[in-house]
Amino acid sequence: MSTFKAPKGTYDLTPPDSAKYLAVREALSAPLKNSGYGYIETPGFEDVALFSRGVGESTDIVSKEMYTLTTKGGSELALRPEGTASVLRAALEANLHKLGNLPVKLWYSGSYYRYERPQKGRYRHFSQVGAEAIGAEDPALDAELIILADQAYRTLGLQNFRILLNSLGDKECRPVYRDALQEFLRELDLDDDTRRRIDLNPLRVLDDKRPEVQKQLVGAPVLRDYLCDACKAYHEEVRDLLTAAGVVYEDDEKLVRGLDYYTRTTFEFVHDGLGSQSAVGGGGRYDGLSEMIGGPALPSVGWALGVDRTVLALEAEGVELELPSSTSVFAVPLGEEARRVLFAKVTELRRVGVAADFAFGGRGLKGAMKSANRSGARFTVVAGERDLAEGVVQLKDMESGEQQAVALDALVAEVQQKLA
Ligand code: HAM
């Protein structure tokens, strides 16, 4: 160990486990690539005001969890705590909404940072795969995203997750509900912090996990009763499309998300094997966000799936991903001349696309064979002076244990044929 450790709330991805994370990222994004979403990448930090305006001053993310910094030039920046505000900012900046047909459909994958209290499944640096469909109000688009996330989790082999679905209303009906809820909450016996939340973000009070608070919330006005006709019809259509696609969901009128930009459709993917940090992914519609950050009206919808928690969920279910071995051939030279000859063969194999590795460091046969085993390679190639004098190498099939002498010149073709 060195003097240093990974910062609190973070962890490193190292082989062989890191391969699992790559496979999960790949699986979560595969359905998007297949559905018209284009890849977008934005900086790891942004103007801090993008998040305070976009995500909302009153949210935990902005008020407590942002990593902010002042640059030498005096700019106020924040490490990105989420992707939606950045992606929308970038799409507007590149005028993607003016270039062609709406919606603009984008996907991304990367690191996000929140100064949260670390615990299992909750980290200060974590990784998301996300999707945003910008500039269209169409229930089929909301349904598409939920269906694609469901497909992504299922392809990975995940089963014990549930989809929670809600509608948060729009700028017509939500304020009416908010007033009614505030009036109800003000009558309750709550601590000062929670009282402050009644003014700032009363819907979040519904999300309070404490039993003494939950007990008092019985009989609180529910948003569903306040939805306007347009929101109701929109939500019904999303539900019908999901049902028609065979996607099972649960209506959860208490689902409030930790970001302020949501309108209408909101959803969360929760996994029951994860304890308190059960959300493996979440998202929803954010029809007002573009205007909040100075853009034109662009109703949009999206989600982000947590890579770290998806890996934990797979582990909780005991799902083993099928990870192809990264090395097909491992070369073990015995002696100086063999080292040069086999190194050249490894290079040749790699150039024709065969994954190959080499016993570096001249550690002798026993150590080298250990490395060959650990590499997971299907074949090892061993050669010493006597083999080379005869113009052959020993090709060993690690699965069957069979070994045969192969002419040096025929090795590459022979291996290619055996692997095909
Ligand atoms: P979010 O619910 O804040 O939404 O995060 C999405 C997912 O990221 C969570 O469900 C969780 O799996 C993962 N996640 C969040 N925080 C942490 C953490 N501290 N440690 C580990 N994993 C975490 C958003 O970020 C929205 N931008 C989603 C969205 C996209 N809405 C519309 N478009």
Image: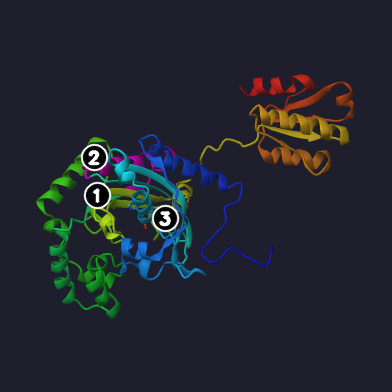
Q: Residue 179, position in %: x, y?
A: 14, 68
For the C terminus, the quadrant is: top right
Label 1: how many residues lie within 10 Å, few (<14), some (14-19) or many (20+)? many
Q: How is the image coloured?
A: rainbow
Q: Of the two numbered discs 3 and 2 on the same chain, state the one appearing first in sequence.
A: 2
In-image side of 8 versus 330 (left or right)? left
The residue that label 2 is drawn on is 140
Is residue 161 shown in magenta?
yes
Q: CA distance from mark 2 to mark 1?
A: 13 Å
Kindly report which numbered mark, 3 or 2, lies closer to the viewer in this rendering.
2
Q: Of the two numbered discs 1 and 3 on the same chain, state the one appearing first in sequence.
A: 3
Amino acid type at circle 1 is Pro
Amino acid type at circle 2 is Ala
Say if disc 1 is inside 8 Å of ligand 1.
Answer: no
| Main SS, magenta residues | helix
The residue that label 1 is drawn on is 299
Say if 289 sits above or below 78 in the image: above
SS state under label 3: loop
In-image side of 340 versus 206 (left or right)? right
The residue that label 3 is drawn on is 274
Q: CA distance from mark 3 to mark 2?
A: 30 Å
Label 3: how many residues lie within 10 Å, few (<14), some (14-19) or many (20+)? some
From the viewer's side, name the closer residue of 138 and 168: 138
SS state under label 1: loop
Kindly report which numbered mark, 2 or 1, lies closer to the viewer in this rendering.
1
Residue sitting at x 78%, y 20% = 409
Name which quarter of the figure residue 49 lies in. Answer: bottom left
Name which quarter of the figure residue 195 lies in. Answer: bottom left
Q: Residue furthest front?
A: 73
Q: How many marks?
A: 3
From the viewer's side, name the closer residue of 225 and 64: 64
**Residues under numbered marks 2 and 1 in contact, where contact means CB atoms less than 8 Å apart:** no
